[in-house]
Structures are given as C-alpha cells and as structure tokens.
Amino acid sequence: MIRIGVLISGSGSNLQSIIEAVNAGSIVGEIVQVISNDEAAYGLTRAAGYGISTKVVKHGDYSDRHGFDQELVRVLKESQVDLVVLAGFMRVLGADFLAAFPDRVINIHPALLPSFPGTHGQDQAFVYGVKLAGCTVHFVDEKVDHGPIIIQAVVPVLSDDSRDRLAARILRCEHKIFPHALALYCAGKLQIEDRKVKISGVDESVLENQFLISCPDLV
Ligand code: GRF
C-alpha cells in the first residue's frame, strides 16, 4: 500500500478529492500525513475531520529554504511516506528535498503546461485570451512546473467568463484528474521515459476520447 504525504497551503479542495478517492478505493494508497506551511489552511481541518495526521511546518520559522525543506523531509520520512503529493502547496521545493523523493513528488497546476507556469496560471490564461485553458498533473523536478507530465485536461473558456468563473471550472477539473493520476501511480501504471510518462494498461482510444477534444466540424 503506497503511503502518501500531502503538502498544502490553503483550502485543500484537491486534498478533499484525493481523500474521497482513497476512501472509495479508487486510489490504492493511504494518506498518512498532511503538512501545511500555513497554520490557517482549511485543508488541515479537512484532514483532521478524516482522522488523518496533520502538521504545520512554517517556512517563516527557518532562515533559509534548505532548513525548511529538511524539516519537511524529516517529518515525511518519519511517517515513512512513499509518495509526496503537492495539493495547492505554494512553496518551491529545493534539490535536496527532491533528492529525498526521486520521481516521487507529484503536483497539480491549473494551466496547460508549459503554458502559464507559476502561481497565477488561470489568471494569465484568462488575460491572454486563450480559448482552451486547462490543468496539468506532473512529476516535480528541479525547475518550477517543468517535470514530466502525467495527465492534462482541457477546459474551454466561455465568452462571458470571468477570472473567477474560469478558475472555478478549472478547479472542478483538477478534482477529477488529480485523483486519477494518483490512482495510476499507486497502481504502478506510470513509467517515466526521458520526459515522457508512459501509462500502461490503458486503452489509447479511451484516452483519446477522454482527454482530447474532438475537433467539431466548423463548416
Ligand atoms: C489549485 O487551483 C491548484 O492548482 C493551485 O492552487 C489551488 C489549490 O486549491 N496550485 P486547493 O487548496 O486544492 O483548494
């Protein structure tokens, strides 16, 4: 059983979707620790409500990123975590942290990487005027929002959208693809080959139907 540690910084709605997928048996894993860098994160309340161990590790308590990362690693190793999940975690993790969990840190980003990396992906996509926004689940490497992509989903931008309406639609999509990606990982179905993530045992036509928008006949 994969032991999962989840890092959060805020509301924890992605954490909630992951907890529900674990409890439904879709993710063959166990969330053994939830850590927030912000003591006010509502995600801590969500985790505690399910009896999941929680801890606050404040980045401001450490003089540098290395000290903060080292404490996170210590707490996660203490809980014998196999997979680290970043669910709205707003801090950049350094090389030492990633070396402690090689190819075992997965993040969700609210844009179609490599477009619109960083902390305001939804907003940048909206302002840019894209017709198709979306979200990405990826392995974390030493560059921000750069690691091998596991799953992406496309979210159409509607003519009367606002920043908030689009962000909310993307978030609802995140709540679907993040648990799905983690279920694939925990089932041992992901293989990284160079920058590509191969998903074994999945009917490509299912993938094509599920995750690619078929181009409608426009004329
Ligand atoms: C999500 O949109 C995620 O993509 C981004 O921050 C948000 C976190 O939301 N990194 P929540 O804390 O999971 O509700």
Image (spheres, rainbow, N blue to C red):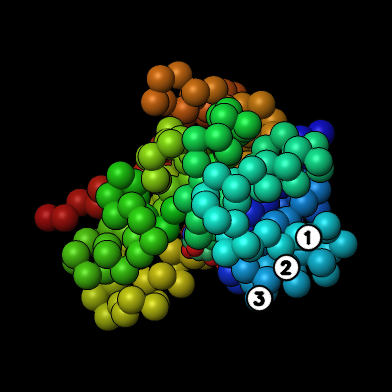
Point out which mark residue 54 bears: 1
Image-based side of 150 in relation to 111, left or right: right
State whether residue 191 is above or below residue 31: above
State whether residue 149 is above or below residue 25: above
- Quadrant of res 14: bottom right
| x then y, percent, for residue 31 | 77, 49
- Can residue 127 be seen by looking at this rendering? yes
Which residue type carries mark 2?
Answer: Leu
User: The N terminus lies in which quarter of the figure?
Assistant: top right
Kindly give the residue lying farthest to the left in the view shown: 219
Point out which mark residue 128 bears: none
Kindly give the residue lying farthest to the front in the view shown: 63
Q: Which residue is mark 3?
A: 40
Image-based side of 178 in relation to 170, left or right: right
- Quadrant of res 170: bottom left
Say whether mark 1 is within 8 Å of ligand 1: no
User: The C terminus lies in which quarter of the figure?
Assistant: bottom left
Labelled pair 1, 2 in contact (Cβ < 8 Å): yes
Between 108 and 33, the residue placed more toward the observer is: 33
- Can residue 214 be seen by looking at this rendering? no
Say whether mark 2 is within 8 Å of ligand 1: no
Which residue type carries mark 1?
Answer: Thr
Give the residue drawn at x 49%, y 23%. Answer: 192
Q: Which residue is mark 2?
A: 44
State the CA–CA distance, disc 3 to disc 1.
12 Å
Kind of element beneath mark 1: strand
Which residue type carries mark 3?
Answer: Ala
Kind of element beneath mark 3: loop
